[in-house]
Image (spheres, rainbow, N blue to C red):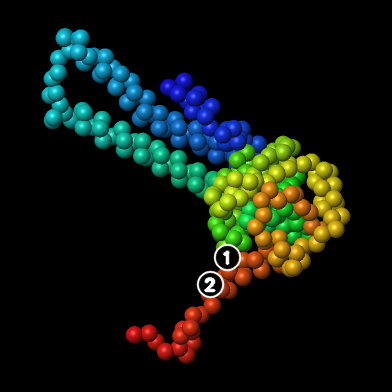
Amino acid sequence: MVASAALLAGACDLRHSAVLDPKGPIALAERDLLFDAFCVMMVVIVPIIILTLAFAWRYRASNTKAAYAPKWAESVRLDAFVWLVPALIVVAVAVLVWRSTHKLDPYRPIDSALPPLDVQVVAQDWKWLFIYPEQGIAVVNQLAFPNGRPVSLRITSDTVMNSFYVPQLAGQIYAMAGMQTRLQLLADQPGKFVGRNSMYSGGGFSDQHFEVLSLSQADFDAWVAKAKQAPAKLDAPTYTALTAKSRLHPITYYSAIEPKLFDSIIAKYTHAHHAPAAGTGPGAAPRR
């Protein structure tokens, strides 16, 4: 079994091994949940493997002394084992899932003495736009923040459904047009990580990844200052041009952003969704 696990791990893409190397409390809790679920499954799998091998050895063709005596049709002990063990496993999994679901609620703020850094995230074809409303800047395909400070993400999509994922810092969560989701993350050490879209979204999906930088406060301030010096500004026409499909889009900085850009991206879908259809609304004739 160990050899099979090693072969399976070797066959996997090395990027997925980042799940087992967390660099923040959220990713650490998710890795521990993965290990806990694995251990619960082993409670079932290991005895089955052992009993299968034991039965095969005991009742092999060459063992003429093995007696086949299935006198267990009315066995209370066997019935209790068959029903109680699975029931206990279901209870254990239910408790594990219940506690973890509330602990890892993506909307739940991270306890910290520092205020969270607000970042607005927009999925596009095939790139990610990060808007920093407090700093008044925006960046394509690069997310930066101070290590040790919580980051509160507001996430949406300006195209088809995407899935935002930074394996070493937080779990994945969907980005959908006309809707807003939240995700909290925190890096407990400086470093460079990889984020990506983990849901197929078209031809450029395989290249839709972004750089994640966990910086010291001084380095983050310098990063913000660098972005503020960029010649490009993310006004409405520039954003419209940015929404065009592109692959391997380079990291791009914008020194200013259109006011309430994130809200307007969501609104253009919600307004269309809630607009009354022909023959509906106040004063319309009732349908029969």
- Label 2 element class: helix
> In the rendered view of the protein, which quadrant contains the C terminus?
bottom left
Asked whether, in this view, residue 39 is left or right of residue 212, the answer is left
Asked whether, in this view, residue 38 is left or right of residue 13, the answer is left
* Label 2 crowd bin: few (<14), some (14–19), many (20+), radius 10 Å: few
Report the residue at 12% width, 24% height from top.
Answer: 71
Asked whether, in this view, residue 257 is left or right of residue 22, the answer is right
Q: Quadrant of residue 92?
A: top left
Q: Is residue 101 above or below residue 239?
A: above
Give percent across and percent down for residue 104: 55, 46
- Residue 246 visible within the image: yes
In the depicted view, which residue is nearer to us: 66 or 102? 66
Separation (CA) of disc 2 from disc 1:
8 Å
Q: What mark, if any, has residue 86 been given in the picture?
A: none
- Label 1 element class: loop
Report the residue at 26% width, 35% height from top.
Answer: 83
Is label 2 in contact with label 1 (beta carbons under 8 Å)?
A: yes
Mark 2: amino acid? His
Report the residue at 75% width, 64% height from top.
Answer: 238
Report the residue at 67% width, 60% height from top.
Answer: 244
Mark 1: amino acid? Gly
Q: Which residue is mark 1?
A: 178
